[in-house]
Image (cartoon, grey):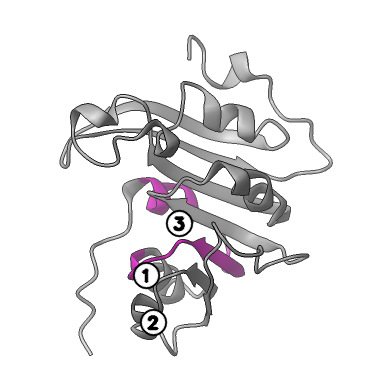
Amino acid sequence: MHDTSPPPSDWVRRWCGDLPPGQALDLACGQGRHLRWLARQGWRVTGVDRDAQALAGLQGLGEMLHADIENGPWPLDGRRFDLVVVTNYLWRPLLQHIIDAVAPGGRLVYETFAIGNERHGRPARPDFLLQPGELLQACRDLQVLGYESGQLRSPERVVQRIAAQRDDAVHPLPLWAVAPGG
C-alpha cells in the first residue's frame, strides 16, 4: 500500500532526526504522518487518538490506542517514552501528563497553534490557541533545546513550537537564555 500521508512537520524532522530510535509516542496522532515517518526511522511507535477510523489505517505500524483523552482517563499512566511528539493539538489539562510521559533523557517535540492564528482560520477559539510563552512555561522543568513562536507560511498559521529534553542531572536553562525577548 502506498503511503499518501503528508510529510512530517519540518520541526519534528529537525528535532527527531538526530535521535537514536527508541520508544516514541505520537499523541493525537490522527492519520499518522509522524508515526509513519518515525517507524521508517526505526522507532517503536505508540499512537493515541480518539478517531478509531484513523487508527484503523495505522494497524501493523505499532501500538495504537483508541482513547478520548479529553473526556476519559489518561491511557498512559506510568508509561514513559524516549520521544513524545504532539502537533496541531492542545488540551491544557493534559500538558502535565504529556510532560510526565517523557522518560529521563527523552525528548518532547511539540508544535501547535498560538494566539494570532484566528486571523488565518481554524483553530480560532482561545481554548485551542497558546498564549505568548505558554509552551515555555509548561516545559519549565525540562531542558529547552529549541523554541520558536510566530507566523509561518504555507499554510499561513501562527504557532509555538518547542523541543525539550528531560535530563534529571542537568538543570533547565533559564527562559531568558532560551528565548531572548520572547
User: Mark 3 highlights which residue?
Assistant: 17
Going 58% across and 64% down the picture, which residue do you hit? 20
Can residue 18 be seen at all in this image of the molecule?
no
Mark 2 / mark 3, whichever is N-terminal: 3
What residue is drawn where x is 62% and y is 27%? 137
* Residue tagged 1: 32
Mark 2 to mark 1: distance in Å?
Answer: 7 Å
Vertical arrangement, residue 6 with respect to residue 90, above or below: below
Residue sitting nearer the eye, 126 or 44: 126
According to the picture, the residue beneath numbered tag 2 turns out to be 58
Q: Indicate the amino acid at tag 1.
A: Gly
The quarter of the picture where residue 73 lies is bottom right
Q: CA distance from mark 3 to mark 1?
A: 17 Å
Q: Position of residue 105 (x, y in %)?
A: 72, 52
The residue most toward the top is 181
Tell me if residue 110 comes above or below residue 69 in the rendering. Answer: above
**Tags 2 and 1 touching, CB below 8 Å:** yes
